[in-house]
Each structure stands twice: as structure tokens, then as C-alpha cells.
């Protein structure tokens, strides 16, 4: 048998408190006395309705404010916490951390009262709700690490490279409100685009933390849009009513977060298809236009070659006729001159003794007139030949290209490296082809 332990009073109280602290529990009872200190701490007593049993309780001011329940005598409540002995007096008190009304009726009454207050302050108004930013990237998440909620959300979020900042929090019952408040306090310091708070549905008691005034006001005051996908009982939790968006499930919340990215992908795909379709149509249209223009150019060039060939033949015939006419006039002038000279000589011989100066002058003038007329005719013929000579264009800067004795009309008539002859006004230039470039024409 172990020897009996011996303690001082303070040691025993410390040992007792350490043991009592591990005995956390929920206690239900009727409030029979309430005292609120000047510092906000609350001292109250609970009693069983049908038994002669009472317990003294204390609730520190911060916890009392956070829980959001105003204690009144006769109210039935459920408290959570553990007992502690106060050494100076030796009295044991239940140190209360959570406080909740008991019964659907009481919870409903508190719910409606807070809802009315929030509405009067404009916190439930649609016009204050903020839209989600386009293409959110930094996403804050508050929910329990346990259960299917976080997995449903993650599996439906898509692969858009989101930067998720997750804070594990209890989401069940009244005890969850401290975790929720701390989680929001933590994420307020982060660079977020959207905050998502999630849990599954449940009863009013299980969702009590989401009807808590402190939690609701923290959501309303959060610096970025808040999505509250917390399910609901018959009445929508106040946290969902005050949030900017309240989808019914974590899956719907994930789709809401990624909606702008999903839409951008659809728009990009549609735009890409439109661009390629218009590109193919435009390419086909250009090809068809080029084909029609090539055919038109070829047709007009053929007509030009035909007209040029006909004109060249006509000019050659005209030149031949002019040459024949010129030769005839040269022969005629020579014959007439010889005839006149011979006649003039004979006349001089026949009349050298008795002709007079007047007759001599008449013959001379007649010869001059005939000779002038023939010279004028000859000059006129030469002018006609000159004006109709194709080589005359060379005097105006034009040139004629020949390759192996053939006229060069197209870039296809020569190849790089060919030796070609360039006929110009005063001679021939021998050249070599180093490059060809087809000139674009418009019709």
C-alpha cells in the first residue's frame, strides 16, 4: 500500500484544480441568480429544475461578450467549461467558457431578435454585398480539417493555381465560435481575394456558432468578400445572411470561386475558334481574288500582245511601202535630172550661136522648180518612215531586251545567269541576269 501523500493547503488546491480542469463538461440548468461586475465579469448560479442541486458559476467578461447571450433569472441555459477552486475562500466555481440557450423556442427567439437588429443596421441588405473579384487567386478557407467538406471543396475548385490559405477550426456547436473568431483574426492579416467559411448542414444547436453575434459581425466586417457555405436548418444561419455570398454546399462554393476562370477558358476557346474560322475564310477569299486577278491579267496581257503583234505587222507593211515609194521617187528624180541635163546640153549646143539669155534663164528656173518638188516629196516620205519606226521609242528612254535573239516580255523569259542584250538609242548593252522580281499588279 502506497504511503499517504501529504500536501500543504495551496499544494492540494493546485493539484485539485489541475484534476478539475481535465473534467470539462456541459451543464444544463436554470439561472436563479445573476450578478454582472463593473469589469464585465458575470457571476451566476444554476439550479436543477426538479432537484435541490445548485452550482456557482463565473464567466469572464470577454467570453460573456463573445457568446452573445444576455443572462436573465429563470432562463434555462447550457454552459460549457470546468470547475476551479478559489484558494483564498476555498469555494469551487464552474468557470464557464460557452453559454447557450436551451430549447428550440429560446434559440428561435434569440435568432429572430438578433436578425431584426442586424437588419435595422443594414447588415442584411443586398446592396452592401460585395461581388467576387474577377480571377481570384488568394483564397482563405475556414473549416474543419476532418470530414468531407474540405475534400468536396478542393476536388471541385479546378486547376487554376489557387493559393489556398487554410485555417483549421471547429464548426460544431457553441464551442466553435472561439475557433471561428480566431481563424478570421488570423486571416485578416493575410493578402486574400476571397474568404470561404464552410461546414455541412445541421440543427439549430449544432449551427449555434454561426448565429452568434460576434461571429456574424466579424464576417460583416471582413475586408474581402466572404462566401459562407455552411448549410442551414429551417432558418438560414445569420452568418450566411450577412455574408456576401451563401451557396448551399462546399461544391457550389468551389464553383463560385472558380467561375470567372471557367468562363475565361470558355471565352478563350470560343474566341480561338472564331479567329481560326475567320482566318480560313479570309485566306480562301484572298486566294480566290488572286486567282481571278491572275486570270484577268493574263487575259488582258494576251489582248495586248495580240494588238501589239497586229500593230507591228501593220507598221512593217507601211515601212515596206514607204521604202518602195522612196526608191521610186529617187529613181524618178534621177531620171528627170538626167533627162533635163541632156536636153539642156542639146539645147545649148543647138542654140549656142543664136540663143539669148532669156531662154537660158527659163530652162534654169524650170529645172530648179522640178528639183525642189522632188526633194520635198522625198523629205515627206522620210518623215513618215521616221515617225512610224518602232526604234524611235528608244530615243525616249525605252529599251528592248533580247535573250538569244528572242524578245523578253516576261520575267519567265529569262533565268538567273542568262546573258541578255539591251537595245538602247545609241547601241547595244550586254548584260547578265542576277535576279528577277515579279511586279504585283492590281486590276
Image (cartoon, rainbow, N blue to C red):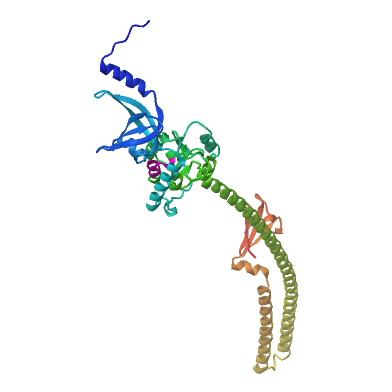
Residue 176 in magenta? Answer: no
For residue 235, side relative to residue 88 (left or right): right
Residue in front for this viewpoint, 336 or 217: 217
Residue in front for this viewpoint, 154 or 119: 119
The answer to whether any part of residue 408 appears in the image is no
Residue in front for this viewpoint, 192 or 348: 192
For residue 159, side relative to residue 35 (left or right): right
- Quadrant location of residue 43? top left
Residue at the image point whose x is 40% and y is 50% from the top = 116
Location of residue 300 in the rendering, given as x and y in whole percent from the top left corner: 70, 66
Residue in front for this viewpoint, 274 or 335: 274
Residue 215 in magenta? Answer: yes
Location of residue 262 in the rendering, given as x and y in whole percent from the top left corner: 55, 46
Q: Please tell me whether the stretch drawn in magenta is mainly helix, strand or loop.
A: helix
- Against 97, is 390 above or below? below
- Against 440, is 310 above or below? below
- Quadrant location of residue 349? bottom right
- Against 2, is 386 above or below? below
Q: Which quadrant, please, contains the C terminus?
A: bottom right
Location of residue 86 in the rendering, given as x and y in whole percent from the top left corner: 28, 25
Location of residue 364 in the rendering, given as x and y in whole percent from the top left corner: 66, 88
How many numbered tags mark residues here?
A: 0
Q: Which residues are magenta?
A: 210-218
Residue at the image point whose x is 33% and y is 19% from the top = 16
- Against 147, is 356 above or below? below
The answer to whether any part of residue 305 appears in the image is yes
Q: Which quadrant, please, contains the N terminus?
A: top left
Amino acid at each position: 500500500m502506497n504511503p499517504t501523500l501529504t500536501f500543504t493547503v495551496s499544494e492540494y488546491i493546485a493539484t485539485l484544480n489541475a484534476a478539475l480542469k481535465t473534467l470539462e463538461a456541459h451543464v444544463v440548468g436554470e439561472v436563479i441568480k445573476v450578478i454582472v461586475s463593473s469589469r464585465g465579469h458575470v457571476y451566476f448560479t444554476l439550479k436543477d429544475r426538479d432537484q435541490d442541486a445548485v452550482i456557482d458559476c463565473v464567466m469572464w467578461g470577454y467570453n460573456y461578450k463573445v457568446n452573445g447571450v444576455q443572462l436573465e433569472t429563470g432562463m434555462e441555459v447550457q454552459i460549457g467549461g470546468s470547475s476551479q477552486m478559489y484558494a483564498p475562500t476555498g469555494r469551487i466555481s464552474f468557470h464557464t467558457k460557452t453559454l447557450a440557450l436551451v430549447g428550440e423556442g429560446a434559440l428561435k427567439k434569440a435568432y429572430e431578435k438578433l436578425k431584426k437588429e442586424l437588419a435595422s443596421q443594414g447588415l442584411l441588405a443586398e446592396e452592401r454585398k460585395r461581388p467576387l473579384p474577377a480571377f481570384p487567386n488568394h483564397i482563405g478557407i475556414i473549416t474543419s480539417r476532418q470530414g468531407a467538406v474540405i475534400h468536396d471543396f478542393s476536388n471541385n475548385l479546378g486547376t487554376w493555381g489557387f493559393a489556398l490559405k487554410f485555417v483549421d477550426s471547429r464548426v460544431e456547436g457553441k464551442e466553435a465560435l472561439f475557433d471561428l473568431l480566431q481563424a478570421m483574426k488570423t486571416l485578416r492579416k493575410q493578402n486574400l481575394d476571397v474568404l470561404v467559411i464552410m461546414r455541412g448542414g445541421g440543427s439549430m444547436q449544432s449551427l449555434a456558432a454561426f448565429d452568434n453575434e460576434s461571429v456574424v459581425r466579424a464576417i460583416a466586417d471582413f475586408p474581402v468578400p466572404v462566401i459562407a457555405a455552411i448549410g442551414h436548418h429551417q432558418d438560414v444561419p445569420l452568418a450566411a445572411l450577412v455574408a456576401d455570398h451563401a451557396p448551399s454546399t462546399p461544391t457550389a462554393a468551389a464553383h463560385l470561386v472558380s467561375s470567372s476562370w471557367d468562363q475565361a477558358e470558355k471565352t478563350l476557346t470560343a474566341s480561338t475558334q472564331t479567329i481560326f474560322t475567320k482566318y480560313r475564310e479570309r485566306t480562301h477569299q484572298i486566294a480566290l481574288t488572286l486567282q481571278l486577278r491572275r486570270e484577268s491579267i493574263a487575259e488582258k496581257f494576251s489582248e495586248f500582245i495580240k494588238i501589239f503583234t497586229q500593230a507591228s505587222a501593220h507598221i512593217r507593211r507601211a515601212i515596206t511601202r514607204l521604202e518602195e515609194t522612196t526608191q521610186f521617187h529617187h529613181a524618178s528624180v534621177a531620171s528627170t535630172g538626167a533627162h533635163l541635163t541632156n536636153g539642156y546640153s542639146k539645147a545649148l549646143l543647138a542654140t549656142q550661136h543664136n540663143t539669148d539669155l532669156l531662154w537660158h534663164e527659163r530652162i534654169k528656173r524650170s529645172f530648179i522648180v522640178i528639183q525642189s518638188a522632188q526633194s520635198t516629196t522625198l523629205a515627206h516620205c522620210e518623215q513618215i518612215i521616221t515617225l512610224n519606226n518602232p526604234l524611235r521609242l528608244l530615243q525616249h528612254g525605252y529599251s528592248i531586251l533580247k535573250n538569244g535573239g528572242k524578245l523578253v516580255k516576261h520575267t519567265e523569259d529569262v533565268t538567273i545567269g542568262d546573258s541578255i542584250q539591251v537595245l538602247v538609242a545609241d547601241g547595244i548593252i550586254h548584260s547578265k541576269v542576277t535576279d528577277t522580281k515579279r511586279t504585283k499588279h492590281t486590276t
